[in-house]
Amino acid sequence: MSETTKPAYTKPLPDMRPEGDHWWAAMKEHKLLLPTDSSGTPFWYPRALVPGTLEPTQWTEAKGTGTVYTYSIHFIGPSKAYKGDPPHTVALIDLDEGVRLMSNLVKDEEGYPSIDPDDVSIGMKVRVVFHDVTDEITLPKFVAA
Amino acid sequence: MSEATPNLREARRMLGKGIVIAGVGETEQGKLEGRGSFQLLAEVTKTTLDDAGITLADVDGMVTAFSFVESTLMHSTTFADYLGMAPGYFASVAVGGATAPLMAVQAALAIDAGLAETVLCVRGDNTRSGISSSGMIAMAREMSHGAYEAPYGLTTIGGYGLLAQRYMYEHNVPQEALAAVVATQSEHAALKWNAMLRDVVSIEDVMNDRWIATPFHAMDCSLVSDGAAAFIVTTADRAKSMRPKPVYITGIGEGYSHQYITSAASVDGVRQGLGRAGRRAMEVAGITPADLDVAEIYDSFSFTPLIALEGIGVCGPGEAGDWVLEGNAKLGSTLPMNTHGGLIRQAHLGAMHHIVEAALQLRGEADDTARGGGNHQVPNAKLAITTGSGGILAATSALVLSSEPPSAA
């Protein structure tokens, strides 16, 4: 693979909904935003209205650091695109701001490849990196902090 | 019985009329090539009507579920048309694995409201042989949030794995506890005439199996199967003229924790959320876990019954693993669980088989020796709980079934 040609990304891409546009636009700029209520308390996942109070959603930028709440090493992926890959680790990460989100644990700043399963533990400290999977879509991934 | 809250009184009033399961049926399970989704439903309808000793003309209500193969927005009426009947009451219930007990609840509500008297509750599908690969991917993605979970390659198995690993970490539960659920249920499935897996496996066999997503080996996971099952809900009065011994619905309940696994607050939050269904059903029935003779607990993965047993109060938090390792869930022991083998060893049709098995146990008809199986009857079984959970431990429903009418509350 030459460095100038990006391989086609065949893994699942996000379902895009209008209320997510702002978050995905920031993600493209390598900024991890969190939706919040009017007092600045963050929630996850992005919705048009704040769950519970149904106020308009506001936004804040996350520091990008957190702790692994739990993980599962996937030896089989959800589609054929994972065939032949080493196992990937899906984790729930408690961000320092107090919300929990799902991501992958990876080795490098580029957001891949998958972390070695032996290096994963509940409670490990992690920080966000940004994986530009297509020209339009960037996914937040996490490396050991 | 303690002073009932108004909503408990209402539930007991309805069930106190005598709402019963009066006929049950199951097809073979497994890979049933050449039999379509509606065909399987029709076949099991005939089996179930024969069991009840009635004909289609006696059925005036139809509750179905959904299909992964036949996409229709009107599943219950589509199937009514296939059968050539015009039900006075119809509903299609779709809450994943929580569907089957809710079908019984839907039937009971319809009967109580006078919308129907004899309701066929039927679910089945040719999921294994009929589903397309894109349908399989869509089914796997169904449990994930499309934007904030699916892009990370989450599978349904791994979604359960996330909570299971945290549960094992918090309570220091060994991998052997999960394997003990599989080994126990394999002993039961060996006796069930239509179980897909009839071989008995050991804890070591499960531990040495290939990994799918930690902490689950392949044998920790439920099966993908073709097949159908059904039960008829009617009044105790109407059931007097039917063949089988009636099985009374004496408790109903639902519980909710979250929709997406990312939104699950904590292990204990999930335990309480899904446990509420069974706790509420037992409260309505006026019983405690110690009164149960048999437990048919939704077992999408080996971990699922552990947190469910704790949620309904059979075991304390973190104690279910030891409880199963000690053999308490086996036939002949404290509280035989999933006496048909469950989703892990018999077949996967949501919680339908759990209800059918519980009814057969309470009828005293769980000896399959004549059909090529074995005797998995719990002697003198009078009280059973059945549960079903949809999503990733998200939404749960439960029934308490009894061989005796509900006592006056």
Image (cartoon, rainbow, N blue to C red):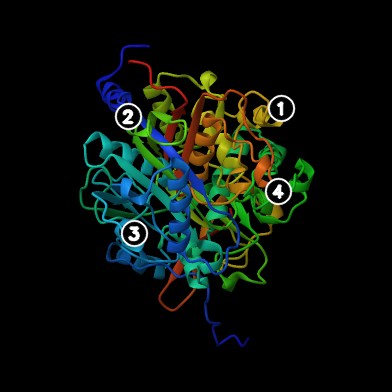
Q: Earlier in the sequence, mark 1 or mark 3?
A: 3
Return the disc, 4 or 2, that comes first in the chain's sequence: 4
Q: Secondary structure at mark 3?
A: helix
Choose top left, top right, bottom left or bottom right for residue B192. top right
C-alpha span from label 4 to label 3: 33 Å
Identify the residue shown where x is 41% and y is 31%: B276
Q: Which residue is mark 4?
A: B198
Residue B272 appears at what percent x and percent y?
45, 31
Q: Which residue bears the numbered disc 1? A: B326
Q: Is residue B351 visible?
A: no
Q: Are marks 1 and 3 on the same chain?
A: yes
Q: Nearer the viewer, residue B155 or B380?
A: B380
Q: Nearer the viewer, mark 1 or mark 2?
A: 2
Do the residues marked 4 and 3 share a common chain? yes
Cα gap from disc 1 to disc 2, whole angstroms = 43 Å
Mark 4 → mark 2, Cα distance in angstroms = 39 Å
* Mark sitting earlier along the chain (3/2): 3
User: Mark 2 — residue?
Assistant: B237
Distance in Å between CA atoms under marks 1 and 3: 44 Å
| Foreground residue among B390 and B106 | B106
Identify the residue shown where x is 47% and y is 30%.
B245
